[in-house]
């Protein structure tokens, strides 16, 4: 079947996107039964009942229409209040907040709004899979900053400074806590990075969707730091903390000009995020915090358990500060991350994501999601140990 | 609630070694704390939550909630009569409650006959018991925070970014 149709050709850019080996591995996992999965990028909790119930009621009450392009003003006001209360940030709900279909859409809009052909975008790697392809699609020249395992996969101010001196970087992508490494930055670390950001006059897209899942310190929003609001597009959403991945609700906050630009594209491509998801998000903000805390406590315990267990069985792993991922090194096995993932799946029926999915520099690592029931996590450790020994 | 208790309350089979890993504390410290909880009566027992509806042999097993109005006694209030009532092995739980009655009992028996006999022959005739109202349980949906359904398969895909 492949390439049998000579009439339609897809664009070169799209053809070159995404490593195909990963797709094949994903298909292999999805077709297999009775697998312990450590490969999932979403919570193992279902959305808290009060949020689901709100969504059901909204349907019953007949809320089935479009909303304004920017999203329900009531939700934008709530987000504005929430960010003020949490980080002391001031975002005008009328023109500095846009409700999107998950952070993924917000990121796509941000790149397309900001980038002129050839603009240089710096993306720390390993990173979430969509960052580079979306920037590339928007016409950017993507430059990777390889973060090091010995720094817990954090970008250091001097690494950032060097990268900016080498290339004329215009935009920086940052994601903390990070998918896939779990690395995050505390206030002091962020302040040090801010100095370099200002020095090189960078504009930053900050994906902070895992902010509520920060375990060792209080998360600080990048745009809440002095002088940053005017140069940051802040992205967040409801998927991770509130276990609402399927609702697909995210949001972007930023300077009026940027949000207006993003809204233009959004209104032509998406029109608006689903009203049902938006109403559920309102309930999440109003009454979801207890559930978030309960999940966070549980994740924190699993984190301690999995990190210590991985180190015990010889897979060296730093303590991630947030999200729900461990990112151990598998270099002692001498295997590539793809072979490790494939063989582990075949021999022990444990699924995880090979590091190479998150950039070539992530080779030699695998991503383990501990958004997995404790019983399964325990069993998975036993099986991984068996696999390494065999 | 302290963290060790929180962990054990949701899964009593978690070992001291596992709790040590989860909390980042030394195993010896966890073991010592658990011993202390046990000896001081904070941890009363480690039990298994069973959904009897799924066990064929226990079809005859019945449970009733009984509201009991009692006359409190001078100096000891409800405590004395409560003790006389909860000492019967048929009574699995006994609570003093606010509202239109005083004690709420959970009573278990092999069948309706046995529970009825207990109420008619033991509970109702007691000196300070004024009135009882019995509700037999027809179906248990949720107990101690757990929904009593057969485990559903996760609806997540096995892998995603």
Image: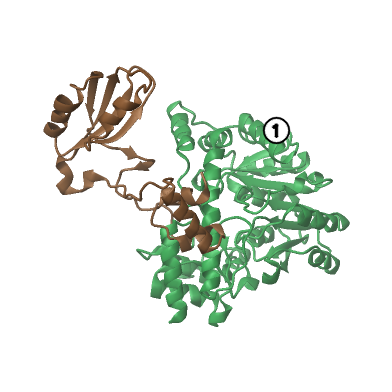
Chain colours: A green, B brown
Q: Secondary structure at mark 1?
A: loop
Q: Quadrant of the N terminus of chain A?
A: bottom left
Rendered view: B78 above or below A120: above
Where's residue A316, x and y in %? 59, 73
A97, A114: nearer the viewer:
A97
Residue under pointer 1: A93
Residue depicted at x 79% and y 67%: A159
A355, B118: nearer the viewer:
B118
Where's residue A168, x and y in %? 84, 63
Residue depicted at x 63% and y 69%: A359
Residue projecting furthest to the right: A199
Residue projecting furthest to the left: B113
Residue B102 in sight from this viewpoint: yes
Is A158 left, or right, of A215 in this rendering?
right
A20, A146: nearer the viewer:
A146
Where's residue B36, x and y in %? 47, 52
Q: Quadrant of the C terminus of chain A?
A: bottom left
Is A319 left, or right, of A197 in this rendering?
left
């Amino acid at each position: 079947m492949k390439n049998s149709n000579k009439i339609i050709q897809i664009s070169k850019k799209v053809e070159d996107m995404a490593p195909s080996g990963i797709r094949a591995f994903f298909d292999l996992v999805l077709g297999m039964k009775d697998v312990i999965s450590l490969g999932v990028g979403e919570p193992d909790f279902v959305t808290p009942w009060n949020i689901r119930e709100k969504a059901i009621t909204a349907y019953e009450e007949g809320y089935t229409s479009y909303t304004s392009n920017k999203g329900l003003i009531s939700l934008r006001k709530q987000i504005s209040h929430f960010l003020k209360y949490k980080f002391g940030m001031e975002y005008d709900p009328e023109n500095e907040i846009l409700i999107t279909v998950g952070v993924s859409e917000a990121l796509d809009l941000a790149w397309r709004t900001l980038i002129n052909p050839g603009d240089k975008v710096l993306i720390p790697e390993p990173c979430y899979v969509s960052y580079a392809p979306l920037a590339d699609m928007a016409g950017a020249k993507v430059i990777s900053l390889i973060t090091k395992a010995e720094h817990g996969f954090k970008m250091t101010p001097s690494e950032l400074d060097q990268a900016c001196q080498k290339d004329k970087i215009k935009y920086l992508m940052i994601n903390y806590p990070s998918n896939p490494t779990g690395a995050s930055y505390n206030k002091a670390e962020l302040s040090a990075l801010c100095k370099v950001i200002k020095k090189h006059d960078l504009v930053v897209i900050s994906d902070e969707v895992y902010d509520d899942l920060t375990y060792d310190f209080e998360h600080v929003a990048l745009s809440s730091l002095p002088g940053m609001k005017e140069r940051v597009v802040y992205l967040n959403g409801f998927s991770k903390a509130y276990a609402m991945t399927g609702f697909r609700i995210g949001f972007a906050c930023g300077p009026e000009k940027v949000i207006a630009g993003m809204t233009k594209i959004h209104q032509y491509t998406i029109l608006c995020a689903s009203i049902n998801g938006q109403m559920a998000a309102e309930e999440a903000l109003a009454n979801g915090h207890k559930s978030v805390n309960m999940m966070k406590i549980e994740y924190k315990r699993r984190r301690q358990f999995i990190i210590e267990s991985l180190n015990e069985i010889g897979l060296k792993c730093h303590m991630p500060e947030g999200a729900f991922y461990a990112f151990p090194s598998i270099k002692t096995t001498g295997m590539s991350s793809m072979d490790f993932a494939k063989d582990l799946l075949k021999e022990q029926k444990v699924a995880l994501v090979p590091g190479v999915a998150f950039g070539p520099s992530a080779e030699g690592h695998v991503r383990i999601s501990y958004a997995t029931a404790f019983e399964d996590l325990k069993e998975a450790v036993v099986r991984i140990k068996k696999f390494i020994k065999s | 609630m302290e963290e060790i208790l929180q962990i054990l309350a949701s899964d009593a089979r978690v070992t001291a070694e596992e709790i040590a890993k989860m909390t980042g504390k030394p195993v010896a410290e966890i073991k010592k704390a658990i011993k202390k909880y046990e000896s001081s009566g904070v941890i009363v027992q480690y039990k298994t939550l069973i959904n009897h509806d799924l066990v064929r042999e226990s079809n005859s097993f019945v449970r009733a909630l009984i509201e009991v109005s009692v006359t409190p006694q001078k100096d000891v209030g409800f405590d004395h009569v409560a003790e006389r009532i909860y000492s019967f092995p048929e009574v699995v739980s006994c609570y003093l409650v606010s509202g239109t009655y005083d004690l709420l009992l959970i009573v278990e028996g092999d069948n309706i006959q046995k529970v009825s006999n207990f109420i008619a022959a033991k509970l109702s005739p007691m000196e300070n018991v004024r009135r009882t109202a019995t509700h037999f349980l027809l179906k248990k949906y949720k107990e101690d925070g757990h929904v009593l359904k057969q485990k559903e398969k996760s609806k997540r895909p096995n892998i995603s970014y």
